Image: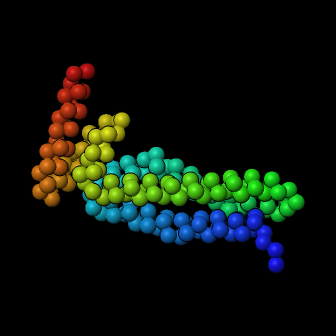
Amino acid sequence: MDFDFADYTYSGLLGLFSAVIGMCYPLMIQAIDRIDEKYQVARFVELFKEETVYVRFQKLILLAIGFAIIAPFALFVMKGILWMQMFVLLCHTLVVLNLLLYVVRLYKLILIYNDPSLFCKHLINKPEECLLEFIDLAKYAAKRENINLYNSCMRRVYELLSKDDEL
């Protein structure tokens, strides 16, 4: 039996992609539900879904699905053209590797959103003003009697409001 590089490589890529879809995607949906349950603020879930990491992850999944469907047909059509097969496999490999990198980045983002102190720092570093988010996070901190987080949030609210007064 001959070793067919294209078929085995495609099978491996399909296995990695299936693992991402089968394991990571449901866990991501659970993480979004946990964020909603933890803070009980729908705005935080919306903010999470607007994060560039999340949006790019969604687009990469669609791209990877397209490659998973099209690649076997492209490889079959290009059976005798080795360099074309390698090009298709290289593109598919880059998409799957990029998807795996975004899984790691998404996991880090989920950890940030699940830790209120890290989430506060994340909101501070966002380029857009998140006044309502800081108020909601301050309410959460007050309920949990987290004085440091409450003070950080209220200080940022004051800064944002005083910046608006200066304009």
In the displayed structure image, the side of residue 22 where residue 155 appears, left or right: left
Residue 36 showing in the rendered view: no
In the displayed structure image, the side of residue 91 where residue 3 appears, left or right: right
Q: Residue furthest right?
A: 80
Image point 29% across, 54% down: which residue? 41
Q: Is residue 117 above or below residue 20?
A: above
Residue 144 showing in the rendered view: yes
Q: Where does residue 165 sit, x and y in percent of width and height?
A: 21, 24
Q: Is residue 60 above or below residue 124?
A: below
Image point 33% across, 64% down: which residue? 34
Image point 74% across, 60% down: which residue? 71
In the displayed structure image, the side of residue 28 where residue 139 appears, left or right: left
Q: Where does residue 161 sit, x and y in percent of width and height?
A: 21, 31
Q: Quadrant of residue 108?
A: bottom left
Q: Is residue 66 above or below residue 55?
A: below
Question: Which corner quadrant holds the C terminus?
Answer: top left
Q: Quadrant of residue 122?
A: top left
Residue placed most toward the observer, 112 or 141: 112
Q: Where does residue 55 sit, x and y in percent of width and height?
A: 49, 49
Residue placed most toward the observer, 15 or 127: 15
Q: Where does residue 142 sit, x and y in percent of width and height?
A: 14, 53
In the displayed structure image, the side of residue 99 where residue 12 appears, left or right: right
Residue placed most toward the observer, 89 or 131: 89
Image point 33% across, 50% down: which residue? 43
